[in-house]
Image (cartoon, grey):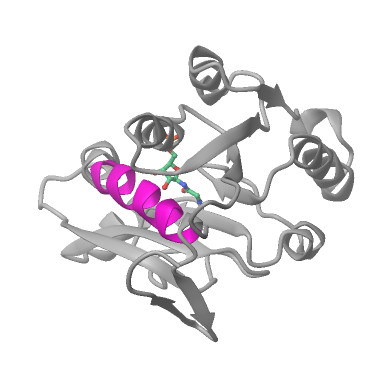
Amino acid sequence: MAEGSVKERLGVLCSGRGTDLQSIIDAIARGEVEAEIAVVLADKPEAYALERARQASIKAVCVDRKQYEGREPFEEALIGELEAAGVTLVVLAGFMRILTPVFVHHYAGRILNIHPALLPSFPGAHAHRDVLAYGVKVSGCTVHFVDEGTDSGPIILQAAVPVLDDDTEETLGARVLEQEHIIYPRAIQLYCEGRLRVEGRHVRILEGKN
Ligand code: GAR
């Protein structure tokens, strides 16, 4: 975002408890992310992320996946809500649905995701389980642009944590989550400052604000 220009309007998509969402809400409140959350969407009514949004006086809407037959009508509904809220950047924060190329093209280059592993290792919905089963000694988290693949878009930021011998999915998940709450707001702010330049698979981080 250039100085003096309009703030990015974030649409945050969640499926669950929403701690990543909370980290973004808190970073905005501290002035560390210069953006506005225009709407929070969840794909199920019980997602606690909706409650977190309401507590922060942010518009919260459930687009209940169960109410739609097929992915395309569901995504059309998501796009409808995002457009109605004037969203300029889509932020996936624990959103456990694969988006079709229709959605990805609609917001090409304007969708971020956080994944709880060091991509390209351990993509998919069970990263911590897969990490522990494989026996790696280091894991972490990855913020990336979303492309048409699963967890395959250009990488913006990563953070690493040790995997301990006695880790469970819960203990490892908690250690990774601490890092998620640092790097996701940071990556969003870099986007908002116009400092991310995508060159093929590479995301260059430009010096200073642009
Ligand atoms: C986070 O660990 C996030 O990286 C992960 O879900 C969790 C959401 O936590 N996302 C994925 O696995 C996406 N494939 P939260 O609901 O507390 O933010």
Q: Residue furthest bottom?
A: 200
- Image-based side of 27 in relation to 91, left or right: left
Which residues are drawn in magenta? Answer: 177-191
Q: Residue at x 63, y 60 (%)?
A: 110
The answer to which of 2 and 91 lies nearer the viewer is 2
Figure quadrant of the C terminus: bottom left
- Image-based side of 164 in relation to 42, left or right: left
* Magenta stretch contains residue 179: yes
- Image-based side of 201 in relation to 173, left or right: right
Occupied quadrant, residue 70: top right
The answer to which of 60 and 197 lies nearer the viewer is 197
Q: Residue at x 54, y 36 (%)?
A: 36
Q: Residue at x 60, y 47 (%)?
A: 6
Q: Residue furthest front?
A: 4
Give how far across and how far down residue 105 sits, in percent: 77, 65
Give how far across and how far down residue 140 sits, in percent: 27, 58
The answer to which of 34 and 156 lies nearer the viewer is 34
Q: Main secondary structure of the magenta part?
A: helix
Q: Residue furthest top?
A: 55
Q: Residue furthest left?
A: 165
The answer to which of 162 and 34 lies nearer the viewer is 34
Occupied quadrant, residue 158: bottom left
Q: Residue at x 75, y 28 (%)?
A: 64
* Vertical comparison of 66 with 101: above or below: above
* Magenta stretch contains residue 184: yes
Q: How many marks?
A: 0
Give how far across and how far down residue 19 sits, in percent: 39, 31
The picture quadrant for ligand 1 comes to top left
